[in-house]
Amino acid sequence: MEKMTSKVRVREILEQAKQSWEQQGQDALLVVIYEGLLKKKVSFPLLEFAAKEMALWIPEDEQLYVMDILVATKEMGSYVLAGMMLQLRLPLYLEESIQRACAYIVGGDQWYVCDIVGERVLGHALLTYPEKNNPFIETLGPIFRQMDCAYDRCCDTLCGKERPLTKICRNYVQAFTFAI
């Protein structure tokens, strides 16, 4: 697997993706992102950088669609891109971003999805907007119980042993369910 370590190279791929999107539409954008970033070994900080850059030129009304398609690939890097883009949307779309993050976690059904998305969206929302979260958290009870079940299935697949990162996932779920 090719390793990418340069912001310059990420910028080149993003420029190619933007041109493809402008000339051929969303599908072309998604192909370039998939092949240029997700199928390569790219560090999380570089993927976060890519997500911030993409959020600048992908219209808000198209961002969720792009994130959904990227996450559907089930590539680990897709959760970093989606999580960071959701984090950037929190100031304007708090509830929608948290609900989408929960959907990605439940649908991802892997311990690392909870860790990646939870850190970037749920954890950030709890720290940045605590006063706005309390009324909203109560409506998410069923979703968090699903997340708890997804967490348990992930632990079962790890031979019944909790790994340190899965404990972080458990902490996100417990923090959000505390008010329920």
Image (spheres, rainbow, N blue to C red):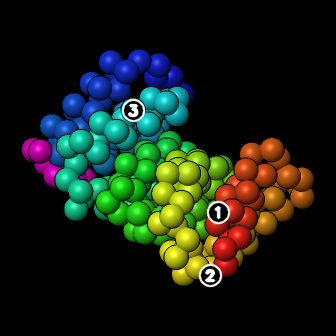
- Secondary element under disc 1, as helix, strand or loop, is loop
Magenta part, dominant SS: helix
Label pair 1/3, CB-CB below 8 angstroms: no
- Secondary element under disc 2, as helix, strand or loop, is helix
Query: Which residue position holds label 3?
Result: 49
Position of residue 162 measured from the top left corner of the image (x, y, whole percent): 85, 52
Disc 1 versus disc 3: distance between alpha carbons? 25 Å
How crowded pointer 3 is (Cα within 10 Å; few <14, some 14-19, many 20+) is rated as some
Q: Residue at x 51, y 64 (%)?
A: 131
> Which badge, 2 or 1, comes first in the chain's sequence?
1
Label pair 2/1, CB-CB below 8 angstroms: no
Q: Which one is closest to the eye, mark 2 or mark 1?
A: 2
> Which badge, 3 or 2, comes first in the chain's sequence?
3
Q: Which residues are magenta?
A: 22-28
Amino acid type at circle 2 is Pro
Residue 146, located in which quarter of the rendered image?
Answer: bottom right
Position of residue 26 measured from the top left corner of the image (x, y, whole percent): 22, 53
Residue 119 bears which disc, if any?
none
Disc 3 versus disc 2: distance between alpha carbons? 33 Å
Q: Is residue 88 left or right of residue 116?
A: left
Disc 2 versus disc 1: distance between alpha carbons? 16 Å
Residue 109 bears which disc, if any?
1
Amino acid type at circle 3 is Phe
Residue 142 bears which disc, if any?
2
Q: Is residue 135 left or right of residue 62?
A: right
> Camera-side residue: 34 or 167?
167
How crowded pointer 2 is (Cα within 10 Å; few <14, some 14-19, many 20+) is rated as few
Image quarter hosting the N terminus: top right
Q: Is residue 118 visible?
A: yes
